[in-house]
Image (cartoon, rainbow, N blue to C red):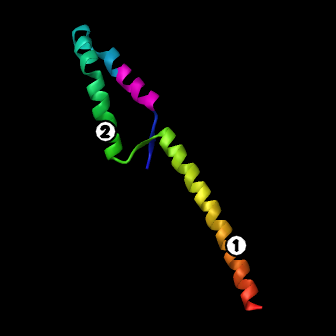
Amino acid sequence: MSDFDKDKIENFFHQIQSALPAGLKEFSQDTEEKCKASFKARLVALGFVTKEEFEAQSAQIKQLQDQITLLQERLAALEGKQDQ
């Protein structure tokens, strides 16, 4: 899964809004939140997560990898004792 930054989304919509003519800017301001929600929902549907979620999941995976390594070492030690 990829991650997305909330600030990047805000900047993306700000760039679009600043490029619009004055009459459309008012329309844009009215629909901006709806567009952001739709855009974020699409990113989630595509498997994107926020940077915070990505970092939390990465930390959890690291902890699980460490636990697996520890268990593998303990198992190898027990198997070594059993062979003797």
State the image coordinates of residue 61 (x, y, percent, origin top left): 56, 55
Q: Residue at x 34, y 36 (%)?
A: 40
Residue type at mark 1: give it: Glu
Quadrant assignment, res 8: top left
Quadrant assignment, res 25: top left
Q: Main secondary structure of the magenta part?
A: helix
Residue that mark 2 sits on: 41
Q: Is residue 64 above or below residue 45?
A: below
Label drawn at residue 28: none
Q: Where the C terminus falls, by quadrant?
A: bottom right
The residue at the far top in this view is 22
N-terminal of the two: label 1 or label 2? 2
- Say if the magenta span includes residue 9: yes
Tag 1's secondary structure?
A: helix
Q: Is residue 68 above or below residue 26?
A: below
The residue at the far right in this view is 84
The answer to which of 26 and 18 lies nearer the viewer is 26
Disc 1 and disc 2 in contact, CB within 8 angstroms: no
Residue that mark 1 sits on: 73
Q: Residue at x 63, y 63 (%)?
A: 67
Residue type at mark 2: give it: Ala
The answer to which of 39 and 52 lies nearer the viewer is 52
Q: Residue at x 60, y 55 (%)?
A: 62
Q: Tell me where the magenta segment starts and ends, as one range.
A: 6-15
The answer to which of 15 and 55 lies nearer the viewer is 55
Residue count near mark 1 (Cα–Cα under 10 Å), binned few <14, some 14–19, many ≥20: few
- Say if the magenta span includes residue 57: no
Q: Residue at x 40, y 29 (%)?
A: 9
Q: Is residue 3 above or below residue 72?
A: above
Q: Is residue 69 left or right of residue 26?
A: right
